[in-house]
C-alpha cells in the first residue's frame, strides 16, 4: 500500500511565476490536508479538503493561494505570482473516512522562490 | 484550539527508555491526544494516539493521566533513528470536520551513542 505521494519533491520558481504542488492520498483515503513549514518554523495548517469540497480553509492566505481535490486525480495546491516568502516545505496528509483519526503525511514539496 | 506544552529539548542515550512529557490542561472531553515526529528533512510521521486509556503500538507507548491533563510518550529503547522533533497535538474527532493538526514547537530529542 503506497503512502502519500507528493510531486514534485523540489520546485524552483522565479518571483511572479506559478507553482503547482500535487498530492496523491493513500489508497482509499478521501480527505486531504495541506500544511506549510517555513524555514526554521513549525508546521502550519492551510486547508482541509474532501473530494470536490473545501471543508476548512482557515489557514490559507487570502490571495494567490488556492486548493482543489477533484473527483479524479490528485489534490492540487496552487500558488500564483510566487514571492520569496512563499519559499517553504509544503506537506500534505491524507485521512481515511469513517471514524479514523490518523493523518498520514507525504514527503513534502520544497519550494524555492528565486 | 487546545494548546499543549512540551520541553524544548531532551537527550537520551541509545538503548535507554525515553519519557517525553506533554501538558494539556485545557483539553476538552472529546479531544484526541496525537503524537507525531519529524525526522530531519522529512514529513511528519505518525507515532501514536489515544483518548483516555493508555495505548501501545510497535513504535511507542502512550500513558495518559487519569484527568487527561497530561500525557507521556514512552520510547522503550531509544535508537539513533529516534532523534527527531516530537509533537504532542490535541485534535477533535475527525468526524466533526475540524481535526486540523495544530503543531507547536515540539520537543527535539537527541540520542547519543
Image (cartoon, coloured by chain):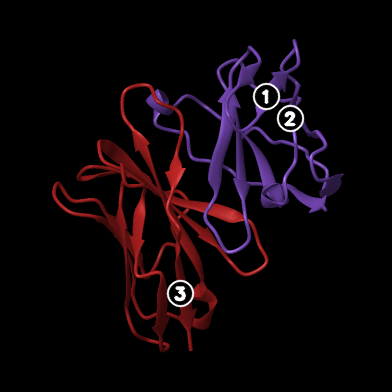
Chain colours: A red, B purple
- Mark whose residue sits in front, 2 or 3: 2
In whole angstroms, how far apart are the C-alphas of marks 3 and 1? 35 Å
Using the image, name the chain to which the residue with label 2 belongs: B
Q: Quadrant of residue B55?
A: top right
Marker disc for residue B27? none
Report which residue position mark 1 lands on: B62
In whole angstroms, how far apart are the C-alphas of marks 2 and 3? 35 Å
Please rate how many residues cluster around mark 2, counting C-alpha atoms within 10 Å: few if below 14, some from 14 to 19, many from 20: some
In whole angstroms, how far apart are the C-alphas of marks 2 and 1? 6 Å
Does residue B52 appear anywhere in the picture?
A: yes
Q: Is residue A59 above or below residue A86?
A: above
**How far across and how far down the image is residue A21, in percent?**
33, 66
Please report whichever mark, 2 or 1, sits nearer to the chain's N-terminal start.
Answer: 1
Q: Quick check: A109 left or right of B108?
A: left
Report which residue position mark 3 lands on: A111
Q: Is residue B43 above or below residue A102?
A: below
Please rate how many residues cluster around mark 1, counting C-alpha atoms within 10 Å: few if below 14, some from 14 to 19, many from 20: many
Please rate how many residues cluster around mark 3, counting C-alpha atoms within 10 Å: few if below 14, some from 14 to 19, many from 20: many
Q: Are marks 2 and 1 in contact (CB under 8 Å)?
A: yes
Report which residue position mark 2 lands on: B74
Same-subunit check for callouts 2 and 1: yes
**How far across and how far down the image is residue B20, in percent?**
78, 35
**How far across and how far down the image is residue A58, in percent?**
45, 48
Does residue B32 appear anywhere in the picture?
A: no
Q: Quadrant of residue B91?
A: top right
Q: Quadrant of residue A54?
A: top left
The residue located at (83%, 53%) in the rendering is B113
Amino acid at each position: 500500500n503506497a503512502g502519500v505521494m507528493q510531486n514534485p519533491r523540489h520546485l524552483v520558481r522565479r518571483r511572479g511565476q506559478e507553482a503547482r504542488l500535487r498530492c496523491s492520498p493513500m489508497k482509499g483515503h478521501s480527505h486531504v490536508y495541506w500544511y506549510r513549514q517555513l524555514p526554521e518554523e513549525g508546521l502550519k495548517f492551510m486547508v482541509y479538503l474532501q473530494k470536490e469540497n473545501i471543508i476548512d480553509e482557515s489557514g490559507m492566505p487570502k490571495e494567490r493561494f488556492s486548493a482543489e481535490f477533484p473527483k479524479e486525480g490528485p489534490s492540487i495546491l496552487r500558488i500564483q505570482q510566487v514571492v520569496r516568502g512563499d519559499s517553504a516545505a509544503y506537506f500534505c496528509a491524507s485521512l481515511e473516512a469513517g471514524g479514523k483519526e490518523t493523518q498520514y503525511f507525504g514527503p513534502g514539496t520544497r519550494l524555492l522562490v528565486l | 484550539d487546545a494548546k499543549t506544552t512540551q520541553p524544548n529539548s531532551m537527550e537520551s542515550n541509545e538503548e535507554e527508555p525515553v519519557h517525553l512529557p506533554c501538558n494539556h490542561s485545557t483539553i476538552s472531553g472529546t479531544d484526541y491526544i496525537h503524537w507525531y515526529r519529524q525526522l530531519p528533512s522529512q514529513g511528519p510521521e505518525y507515532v501514536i494516539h489515544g483518548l483516555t486509556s493508555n495505548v501501545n503500538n510497535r513504535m511507542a507507548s502512550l500513558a495518559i493521566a487519569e484527568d487527561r491533563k497530561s500525557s507521556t510518550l514512552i520510547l522503550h529503547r531509544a535508537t539513533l533513528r529516534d532523534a527527531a522533533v516530537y509533537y504532542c497535538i490535541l485534535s477533535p474527532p475527525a468526524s466533526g470536520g475540524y481535526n486540523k493538526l495544530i503543531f507547536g514547537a515540539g520537543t527535539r530529542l537527541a540520542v547519543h551513542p
